């Protein structure tokens, strides 16, 4: 029986930004961007859920909301059944150790003035101030070995490491406090292709050893193909399709998922995949009626202009938000 670890419901987060038009009058009129726009998502214990979508679709915003770095405007995030999205900083403290994040750029995520050892020991001492520092140092050496870093590098500074080594240190740091849930925001995209596979393998191996739950964000469908248990496809702040990895890659249903696959040469595209989107990724605009893909979807029809499609199950554990599919027209 699958257990839900994190349950996100109808989540909203808007930012206000200067108007894109450079005229002063326009810039004073700030526009609102719905970075997260009514998003629903459940994450099961022990799974790797990969969220895939183009740059600007709201991945990093969702990562920050889940981690409690920012608060949503509306909606809720539950952790083991308890709403955590609006907890006070003190009440949140109990969850800080249980969930950790690995950021995209392994260099800027590390303080350049701290040695590797310092970076690893610091979070342990923060969560366990009474602990003998020598025990934390021993734990750090063991953790370095676990992520494939020679302990002799412990006294180095971040700039003295390669990109792959830095990302290993970031992963080690996240794991120092024994979390059960790890969020990774584009953990591979700053790395060379040859290093990406090594980091993917490391993440998979650590998950097995420590029974971790992963929420991994990526703009690259091909990168998650070998890693995900389930894949959620995100477009303009919402999930438009979610299913097991096999279902998503063998039978993508949403026009946007199909277009993402057609645009990834590494992915073998199913033969029924005849969708191409028109136009470019739009500038994010304030809320409007209808499906957010309506201007780019060649098959959009009347309902798509008026009503936002909701996620509906098409077969067991495969949900799609598309009027055409949900009305059984395809
Ligand atoms: N702090 C912020 N202030 C204003 N706009 C923001 C902020 N963070 C994100 N955005 C906007 O929200 C949208 C989603 O951004 P983001 O979550 O970074 O997407 P992704 O990680 O998928 O590239 C973008 O249009 C971005 O410009
Ligand atoms: Mg991002």
Image (cartoon, helix red, strand yellow):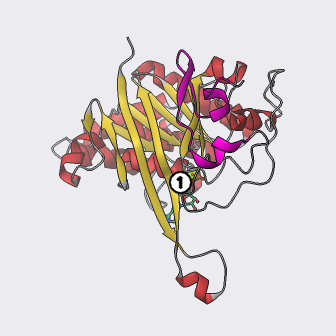
Residue farthest to the left, as pictured: 130
Residue 303 picture location, percent across and down: 64, 42
Question: Could one spot residue 311 in this view of the protein?
Answer: yes
**Front in this rendered view, residue 72 or 135:** 72
**Front in this rendered view, residue 212 or 254:** 254
Whether residue 96 sits left or right of residue 37 in the image: it is left
Q: Does the magenta run of residues contain 316?
A: yes
Residue farthest to the bottom, as pictured: 24
Ligand 1: image quarter: bottom right
Q: Element under label 1?
A: helix
Residue farthest to the front, as pictured: 302
Q: Quadrant of residue 263?
A: top right
Q: Does the magenta run of residues contain 10?
A: no
Residue 74 to residue 144: above or below: below
Residue 311 to residue 73: above or below: above
On the rendered image, what quadrant is the N terminus found in? top left
**Front in this rendered view, residue 295 or 9:** 295
Residue 51 picture location, percent across and down: 56, 37
On the rendered image, what quadrant is the C terminus found in? top right
Q: Residue at x 80, y 34 (%)?
A: 275
Disc 1 target residue: 158
Q: In the image, which residues are magenta?
A: 300-328
Whether residue 243 sits left or right of residue 2 in the image: it is right
Number of numbered markers: 1
Residue 19 picture location, percent across and down: 59, 76
């Amino acid at each position: 029986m699958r257990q839900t670890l994190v349950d996100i419901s109808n989540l909203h987060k808007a930012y206000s930004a200067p108007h894109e038009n450079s005229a002063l009058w326009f810039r004073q009129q700030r526009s609102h961007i719905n970075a997260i726009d009514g998003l629903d998502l459940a994450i099961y214990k022990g799974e790797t859920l990969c969220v895939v979508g183009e740059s600007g679709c709201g991945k990093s915003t969702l990562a920050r909301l889940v981690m409690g770095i920012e608060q949503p405007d509306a909606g809720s995030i539950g952790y083991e059944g308890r709403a955590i999205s609006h907890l006070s900083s003190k009440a949140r403290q109990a969850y800080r150790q249980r969930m950790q994040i690995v950021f995209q750029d392994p260099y800027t995520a590390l303080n350049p003035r701290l040695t590797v050892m310092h970076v690893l020991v610091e979070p342990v001492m923060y969560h366990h101030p009474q602990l003998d520092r020598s025990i934390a140092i021993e734990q750090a050496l063991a953790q370095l070995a676990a992520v494939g870093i020679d302990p002799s590098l412990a006294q180095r500074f971040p700039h003295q490491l390669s990109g792959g080594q830095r990302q290993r240190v970031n992963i080690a740091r996240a794991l120092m406090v024994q979390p059960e849930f790890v969020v990774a925001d584009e953990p591979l995209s700053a790395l060379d292709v040859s290093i990406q596979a090594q980091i993917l393998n490391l993440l998979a191996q650590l998950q097995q050893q420590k029974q971790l739950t992963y929420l991994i964000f990526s703009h690259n469908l091909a990168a998650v193909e070998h890693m995900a248990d389930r894949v959620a496809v995100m477009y303009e702040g919402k999930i438009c399709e979610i299913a097991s990895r096999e279902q998503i890659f063998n039978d993508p249903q949403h026009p946007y998922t199909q277009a993402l696959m057609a645009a990834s040469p590494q992915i073998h595209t199913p033969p029924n995949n005849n969708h191409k989107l028109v136009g470019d990724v739009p500038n994010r605009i304030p809320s409007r009626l209808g499906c957010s893909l309506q201007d780019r979807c060649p098959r959009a029809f009347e309902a798509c202009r008026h009503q936002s499609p909701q996620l509906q199950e098409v077969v067991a554990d495969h949900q799609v938000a598309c009027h055409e599919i949900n009305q059984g027209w395809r």
